[in-house]
Amino acid sequence: MFALKEARGIGTEATRAKVLETLKERGYLAADRKALVSTPLGREVIALTPPALKDPITTAEWESRLEAIAHGAETLDVFLADQCRILPDLLAPILGDGKPAFPCPSCGAALNRRKRKKDGAWFWGCTAYPDCPVILPDDNGKPGKAKPRPALSEYACPACGKPLAKRSGAKGEFYGCSGYPGCKTTCPVKLDGSPDFEAKKKGK
Ligand SMILES: [Zn+2]
Ligand SMILES: [Zn+2]
């Protein structure tokens, strides 16, 4: 196991100040009174960055190899060949390489792993949001399967005009407004399969 202290660390106090300045200039950090806080952009970049690139051990390892090159213990060619081998894999999720590692099933743009504020749960959102509202659950660090969306029916919601969708609940099939949760209209299914607007009731 490679420990940080075995290497020369990841920078000195002097370089740290410069790094923090750069992070502020790029909008990744902002001063909040006396504290430095990450901006939403900064957190997004971190969320997109592959774990190996975020790990200070990676930088420390590279620093120590550069040191070895300076001492003639390793050659620059070997180091560069290693970088060329691993960087495409590391950067693929960010650069996309034309094809994102996790493409949106709807529009093909990259999916982005995000943390829900409410409960801290991970989910995947399309980077083309708001043009593409695709949201997928997280499945151990990968986008999971979306719940199949109920097919829209030819019937319009009597309350808001959006199409009704046939859904199945504990008490069997019913029609629910596709505008849910904005519109909570539901109504039972008649024997002929059409919505029973007479018996229409509003959900809670
Ligand atoms: Zn999309
Ligand atoms: Zn409706």
Image (cartoon, helix red, strand yellow):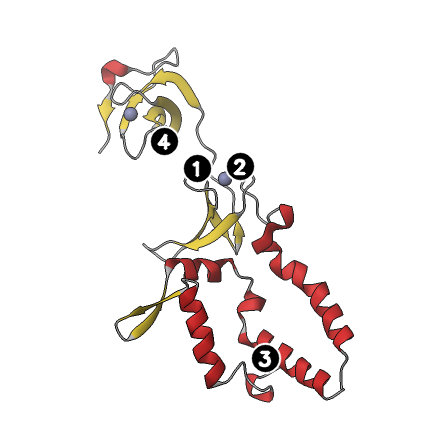
Q: Secondary structure at mark 2?
A: loop
In the rendered image, residue 196, in percent from the top left (x then y), is placed at 29, 15
Give yes or no for contact between labels 1 and 4 (Cβ–Cβ under 8 Å).
no
Label 1 belongs to which residue? 131
Q: Tell me: 157 left or right of 135.
A: left
Residue 55, image x and y in percent? 54, 72
Q: Are marks 2 and 1 in contact (CB under 8 Å)?
A: yes
Q: Quadrant of residue 44?
A: bottom left
Q: Earlier in the sequence, mark 1 or mark 3?
A: 3
Give the secondary structure at mark 4. Answer: strand
Nearer-N-terminus badge (2/1)? 2
Image coords of residue 17 (percent x, y): 43, 79
Where is mark 3, residue-wise?
A: 60
- Identify the residue under disc 2: 107
Give the mark, 4 or 2, whose residue is nearer the N terminus.
2
The amino acid type, in three-letter code, at marker 2 is Cys
